[in-house]
Amino acid sequence: MSVVYRSFGILLFVFSTVAGGDEIAKQVSSPASESEPKKYYVNDIKKAMMEYIAGEIDENGVFRLLDDKTGELLELKFVKIHDPVRVINSNTYFACTDFHVVGNPKILYDLDFWMQPETGELKVFKSKIHKEPRKSLIYGWYKQPRYTFVDDKVVPLY
């Protein structure tokens, strides 16, 4: 005979043996500990990104970013968040986005954002230009990567 008990958020299966009536209890799952970090999911990451972008744009919807490589102040308009967004580790989340140059939707920058929980909400703590616009005579505008990822770490390409 088996009986299921639920007590203090711990699920226990108790098995009674036929021979002696001894009980053997096996812990199947336990509640999340208070010290474990809260987990954030796709919708949480995307919501945090949209809130961050909304807080950074001006009244005309322009997102300004200083290009750390060229020193140019970029004026961009948000296009989209790429799928998938990612969990880097238990405390770091990542989203990749597209922004176009104000006045020219064909010229795209790919911007990466890293987030961590702060007072119960995901907050952006780092941003970086992943891909910059380049023009090809044959293909037109494309995004040229500045770096790649190896084991979730940024590795410059040039």
Image (spheres, rainbow, N blue to C red):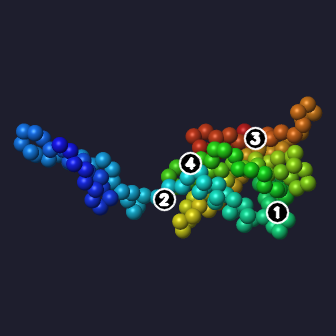
Q: Which residue is mark 2?
A: 38
**Callout 3: few (<14), some (14-19), or many (20+) C-alpha neighbours within 10 Å?**
some
- Say left or right for 16 vs 67: left
What is the CA distance from the residue labelled 2 to the residue labelled 1?
Answer: 32 Å
Query: Between tags 2 and 3, which lies in front?
Result: 2
Q: Which residue is mark 1?
A: 61
Amino acid type of the residue tagged 1 in the rendering: Gly
Amino acid type of the residue tagged 2 in the rendering: Lys
Q: Please tell me which residue is depicted at 25% across the width and 54% down the height of the picture.
A: 5
What is the CA distance from the residue labelled 3 to the residue labelled 1?
Answer: 25 Å
Q: Please tell me which residue is depicted at 79% across the width and 40% down the height of the picture.
A: 144
Q: Please tell me which residue is depicted at 55% across the width and 52% down the height of the picture.
A: 41
Q: Which residue is mark 4?
A: 88
Q: Please tell me which residue is depicted at 80% across the width and 45% down the height of the picture.
A: 132
What is the CA distance from the residue labelled 4 to the residue labelled 2?
Answer: 14 Å
Image position, residue 131 (x, y; %): 77, 44
Most extreme residue toward the left is 20
Amino acid type of the residue tagged 3 in the rendering: Pro
Whether residue 71 is visible to the viewer of this picture, yes or no, is no
**Mark earlier in primary sequence (4, 1):** 1
The image quadrant of residue 157 is: top right
User: What is the number of the mark on residue 145?
Assistant: 3
Amino acid type of the residue tagged 4 in the rendering: Ile
